[in-house]
Image (cartoon, rainbow, N blue to C red):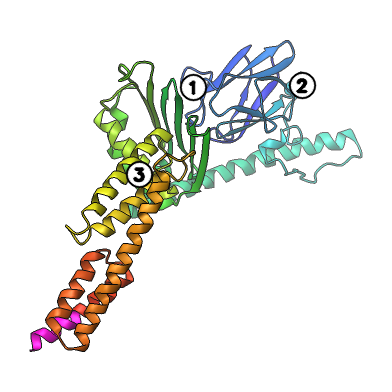
Amino acid sequence: MSNYILVFEAGLRAGAQIPIAAKNTTLGRSSDCDIPIADPALSRVHCSFELKGAELWIKDHQSANETLVNDLAITETKLNPGDIITAGDSIIRVTVAASDSLASAEPSLSTLPQSAFGSDVVIDLGFDTPDTDTAKLHQKNIVRPILWGFTALLIFFSCLWVIFTMDSDKKSGKNQTVVAEKDASILIYYEKIDASPSNIFRFELSLASDGLLVVKIDDLAGGNRHIRKEKKIDNEILSSLSRNVMQSGFFTLDKEYTGLPSTPNTLSEHYLVTAIGKKFHSCRLLNRTDEPAAFKTLREKIETFSKNELGIWAIQFSTEKLTELAQNAYDVARKQYAERDVKLGNRHEAIRNYQESLFYLDTVNPKPIFYDQLLQEMEAAKIDLKQQLQEQNFRADRAINLADWPTAARELKIICELLPNRADEVHKTAARKLLDVETRIKKR
């Protein structure tokens, strides 16, 4: 029999101690694994432990997030007592069981493993007297009944306290709230892959139980672009997200939906895993252009959530998609500016679309051929708008000085239409003047 034990020090199974009894023991997200863990950061079969004689070896099964031993990524390596394994959110320490002689001996406080009380705690009741073996035996016979009696009383009063507390909480509704909050802990893993002969684009989002949101983006065609952003999410926001997940209908979906690629030699895959408390579900879409409604609802909520929290609205798209979006915004901007005299607000809207085009191109390298022209046209539109506003302000102020209130009102309205953004200081100033002018017109 093996004497190796895996002690889980962090993660979903923190506190568990699992002996390695089989020659090959698998660990992963799949329920078919010998050690299943509903951790979105794990692959379905993440790693395995193999006994080779008296030695314990660990093997990584090409996992997405790798298996680390003492903070080093491994393919396969021998394990020693004290080694630390990192797999997903789990941190596992390798230990060995006590020898057969100790295991068969009568247990006492001195032979209990230190982990039973905490790694830094030493128990010393002060009863030991090293003088004679008889004294030790006498103390052992006296101490044990005392300890058992004390333990029984402690358990009895603890049970009374728990019953009283539960009854009190039940009346106040507090217990239900605490349980609901505990069960509302949320885990999310979302992966989107678009692959073609010319590019592989991968978007990965993970939300851990401690509220850490991490987004990774790999875009091979976009200059081998790799982006990683993370943020700790507030508990109140997590609670709101948990409610959205529960109401989405995601837990009623099948585990997999498969279709045919829209274009030959391409792959489109969406994989979403959610866990709220003890409720867990996963769903994979492969080459599906028609998403199930519940999947689409939850996917859009999660993507919007990550955009708002991390400010990654654009970078989650491939270089080709970003360039396409930029080209579309650029075309709209040019059309609006060409029609600047048709509608007064077109200059402002053209500038906004020029800026949107630049936003899409922020992480795109090399820049597309229209990039330099875009910059020049946007700068020209800004100068044109500035001159128009200065001219209108001059006309409005002149009319105000001449007490020509109808003319002043007309010129001020033109300023507000040229710059429809109510948050802009120029618009605010013109609006205040217009209000005053209209008041004077009414008094005439």
User: Which quadrant of the rendered structure holds the C terminus?
Assistant: bottom left
Q: Which residue is mark 3?
A: 304
* Residue 438 is a magenta residue: yes
* Residue 440 is a magenta residue: yes
Query: From what the image shows, is residue 3 above or below residue 336?
Result: above
Q: Residues within 10 Å of mark 3 (few under 14, many from 20)?
A: some
At horizontal 19% and vertical 75% (from top left) the residue drawn is 411
Q: Quadrant of residue 253?
A: top left
At horizontal 27% and vertical 32% (from top left) the residue drawn is 294
Q: Residues within 10 Å of mark 1 (few under 14, many from 20)?
A: many
Amino acid carrying label 2: it is Ser
| Residue projecting furthest to the right | 131
- The answer to whether residue 245 is seen in the rendering is no
Q: Which residue is mark 1?
A: 44
Amino acid carrying label 1: it is Arg
Q: Are marks 3 and 2 in contact (CB under 8 Å)?
A: no
Q: CA distance from mark 2 to mark 1?
A: 35 Å
Q: Quadrant of residue 397?
A: bottom left
Of marks 3 and 2, the one in the foreground:
3
Q: CA distance from mark 1 to mark 3?
A: 27 Å
What residue range appears in magenta?
Answer: 435-444
Residue 197 image position (x, y, % from top left): 44, 20
Q: Residues within 10 Å of mark 2 (few under 14, many from 20)?
A: few
